[in-house]
Amino acid sequence: MKRTLVIANWKMNLNTHEASMLLHRYHQHIATHRDIEVVVAPSMLSLQPLSQEIDRHRFRLSAQDGYYKDEGGFTGEVSFAMMRDLVHYSIIGHSARRIYFNETLEVVREKVAAAVRNGIAPIICIGETKQERDSGETKQVIHDQLTTALRNVTSDEIENIVIAYEPVWAISTFDGEPAKPDDMKKALDYIRFQVRELYGERAAADIRVLYGGSVSDQDAAAFIGIEGCDGVLVGAASLNYAKFAGIVDAAYRVARERE
Ligand code: PEP
């Protein structure tokens, strides 16, 4: 059975001391459930200390990004090769990377390949901007972002990939408001359809597809409860341990109802 994923993206927040404190609160307040996988994505700076503090039986660590070359003269970058013993996952292609740092489809594809080659499971973020949505391009954007990101991924590797549908207009950083569950379901179904076209029925059923965008403890259950939604990627609300604990509880309630 697939485990529901609940991912905390702390974005560029918290120094190492603050990150350590928040992790401590997670340890105190977040219940452990067999069916729920909780993943913490702190800043690059905090990965090393948190890797020593985290209770690996309960939480997994994720990077928020990485560079696609394994080593060399790439001043300022950190490669997936350097993180291979630290993290289980890495977020790749987050809209903040695509928009603020001009990450192209090809760069995202190279990063996915680099993560896979280093044994790190990519959490590939895809989603359209408001302008693209208003001009009816949602499916085209999802198609282009997904097929390019997966271009070098083999049918043996697809089972370790996670796709997060994060419409840019829904992300709090861009003053977004959550998607309507109906819109989100259409996008998730389309993502699974694309995976089926590329890798077949089994891969499409097994791959975990998440929603992200202004998720809170109040509406998490409504999203996770949608058929085909395997979890949530949470930004702002994950910085509040009580809200994040509420989201994990909501995921657990939905998983129990599904059993
Ligand atoms: C994100 O940055 O991936 C995200 C989903 O953020 P928020 O929950 O703050 O909208």
Image (cartoon, rainbow, N blue to C red):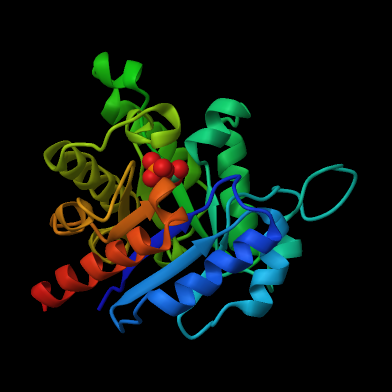
The mark total stands at 0
Residue 99 seen anywhere in this rendered image of the structure: yes
Residue 125 seen anywhere in this rendered image of the structure: no
Q: Nearer the viewer, residue 102 or 139?
A: 102
Q: Residue at x 45, y 58 (%)?
A: 8
Check the image and name the residue furthest to the right.
73
Residue 240 placement, left or right of 3: right
Residue 54 placement, left or right of 205: right
Residue 147 placement, left or right of 18: left
Q: Nearer the viewer, residue 74 or 255?
A: 255
In x, y percent, where is residue 248? 31, 67
Q: Residue at x 68, y 63 (%)?
A: 17
In x, y percent, where is residue 154? 48, 59
In x, y percent, where is residue 188? 23, 46
Q: Image quadrant for the C terminus?
A: bottom left
Q: Image quadrant for the N terminus?
A: bottom left
Q: Residue at x 29, y 62 (%)?
A: 247
In x, y percent, where is residue 55? 54, 82
Ligand 1 appears in which quadrant?
top left
